[in-house]
Image (cartoon, grey):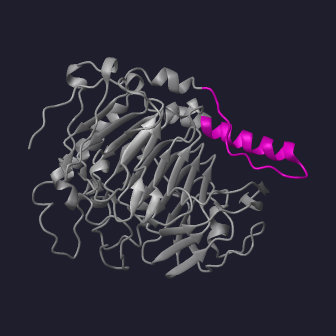
């Protein structure tokens, strides 16, 4: 059923975001030379933070509208017909590459396919292909050539692929350098044991891998680039942890059962898209902004699109602070507490999602404002447009004095939530075979 357009003003975020004070970041330390290691990370983070300020979109509604226009163009009634094989791409990201039988010889085409705030993520585009042949992770300071760790710490752009299906059990957090694509297409790749960390980097794509059973680790001497290693403090056991980074795209991953969050994005990270992924069996799914004091997260702009939030999930899909979050065309089939939450005045625009509430009468509300009375959150811009609410689900909107009508700058409607089953039909890792469409 058609919905009347929403007229929402996003009150001035750009000035606040760009001027936001720097907050503490996860800083590795050494027992022998604390100062030099801290200086290294501070310099690396500040370089990327300056880049992040440049990637900040002063008019996020324009980016939101471009996304929705792409979806509308790519999803005609015919394209959303019942799947009959051998390939059906049901959203604009997948239509860019999935049904091409030459995807294996033209892997880097994927870097042109991102949409949303992470649309500029290049990953390892323009670089050489690096093939992971060895699933071991025994050497943390001088990684063995052929391992995933050796590839991700290189200082040049690399497109990382896998020689065969494998299980990589990380012995400590995997620190990914800038300009890398981890591309699991053509194999079934499972990354377990410890988290994937993106800290102070830009242009990273993670695509087509299973990430699960990440555990906390006490840290130690770990290499993060070709020219530097240092003593890392404790890692939490997230699936993917993004700190002070930008132009990040996470697509077609399957994630479950990690010790902390599945995806955490913190410390002023921005220009990020999480798409076409499948999340199951987890409590704290996504955390976007880790602290009420990290005002630098006002620059955070994230698109969450075409994902399936499935069985065994509890909360935080996502939980947001400060920034601007476009949650669009996702399928929420399970939650135990709530789906979307936050505090510290995040802007959350929910469009064209399907929310199927649990049978528990106390968990029907999609939204949760954390530690904030109505007098505070009534002015936070949280809007629902074209969402489908099932089994008693409801979205508690707010906006207050931060709303006004402003004509042609209104939101372009997303594809309606009734189409979400088709749009997310192939969420998660795909069974791609060389020479055939995925």
Q: Name the foreground residue: 417 vs 150.
A: 417
User: What residue lies at 49% left-to-right and 66% top-to-bottom?
Assistant: 257
Left or right of 415 on screen, residue 364: right
Query: In the rendered image, which quarter contains the N terminus?
Result: top left
Q: Is residue 371 visible?
A: yes
Q: Name the foreground residue: 268 vs 382.
A: 382
Instruction: Tally the marks.
Output: 0
User: What residue lies at 64% left-to-right and 76% top-to-bottom?
Assistant: 146
Q: Would residue 270 be counted in the magenta stretch? A: no
Q: Which residues are magenta?
A: 21-49
Left or right of 174 on screen, residue 392: left
Q: Would residue 24 be counted in the magenta stretch? A: yes
* Residue 312 picture quarter: bottom left
Q: Name the foreground residue: 135 vs 405.
A: 405
Of all residues, the one furthest to the front in this rendering is 361
Please provide percent x and percent y for residue 345: 44, 29
Query: In the rendered image, which quarter contains the C terminus?
Result: bottom left
Please provide percent x and percent y for residue 260: 56, 57
User: What residue lies at 12% left-to-right and 64% top-to-bottom?
Assistant: 81
Examine the rendered structure and indicate whether residue 70 appears above or below residue 55.
below
Please provide percent x and percent y for residue 7: 22, 25
Q: Is residue 229 visible?
A: no
Of all residues, the one furthest to the right in this rendering is 32
Please provide percent x and percent y for residue 297: 53, 34
Q: Name the foreground residue: 229 vs 345.
A: 345
């Amino acid at each position: 059923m058609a919905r009347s357009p929403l007229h929402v003003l996003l009150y001035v975020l750009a000035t606040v975001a760009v001027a936001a004070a720097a907050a503490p970041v996860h800083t590795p330390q050494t027992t022998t030379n604390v100062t030099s290691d801290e200086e290294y990370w501070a310099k690396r983070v500040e370089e990327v933070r300056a880049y992040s300020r440049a990637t900040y979109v002063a008019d996020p509604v324009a980016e939101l509208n471009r996304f929705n226009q792409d979806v509308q163009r790519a999803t005609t009634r015919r394209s959303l017909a019942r799947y009959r094989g051998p390939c059906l791409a049901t959203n604009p990201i997948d239509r860019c590459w999935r049904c091409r039988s030459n995807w294996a010889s033209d892997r880097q085409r994927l870097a042109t396919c991102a949409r949303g705030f992470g649309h500029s993520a290049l990953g390892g585009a323009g670089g050489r292909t690096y093939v992971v042949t060895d699933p071991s992770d025994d050497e943390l300071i001088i990684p063995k050539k052929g391992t995933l760790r050796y590839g991700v710490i290189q200082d040049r752009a690399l497109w990382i692929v896998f020689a065969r299906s494998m299980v990589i059990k990380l012995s400590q957090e995997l620190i990914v350098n800038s300009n890398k694509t981890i591309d699991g297409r053509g194999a079934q790749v499972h990354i377990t044991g410890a988290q994937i960390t993106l800290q102070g980097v830009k242009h990273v794509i993670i695509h087509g891998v299973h990430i699960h059973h990440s555990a906390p680790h006490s840290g130690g001497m770990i290499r993060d680039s070709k020219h530097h290693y240092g003593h890392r403090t404790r890692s939490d056991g997230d699936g993917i942890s993004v700190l002070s980074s930008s132009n990040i795209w996470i697509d077609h991953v399957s994630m479950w059962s990690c010790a902390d969050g599945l995806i955490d994005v913190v410390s002023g990270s921005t220009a990020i898209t999480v798409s076409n992924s499948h999340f199951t069996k987890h409590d704290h799914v996504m955390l976007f902004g880790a602290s009420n004091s990290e005002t630098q997260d006002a620059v955070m702009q994230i698109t969450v699109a075409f994902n399936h939030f499935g069985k065994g999930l509890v909360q935080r899909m996502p939980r947001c602070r400060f920034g601007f979050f476009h949650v669009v065309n996702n399928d929420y089939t399970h939650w135990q507490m709530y789906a979307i939450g936050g505090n510290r005045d995040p802007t959350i625009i929910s469009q064209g999602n399907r929310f199927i509430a649990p049978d528990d009468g106390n968990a029907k509300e999609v939204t949760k404002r954390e530690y904030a009375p109505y007098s505070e959150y009534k002015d936070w811009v949280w809007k629902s447009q074209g969402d489908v609410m099932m089994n008693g689900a409801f979205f508690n909107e707010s906006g207050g004095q931060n709303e006004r009508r402003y004509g042609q700058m209104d939101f372009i409607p997303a594809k309606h939530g009734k189409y979400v089953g088709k749009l997310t039909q192939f969420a998660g890792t795909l069974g791609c075979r060389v020479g055939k469409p995925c």
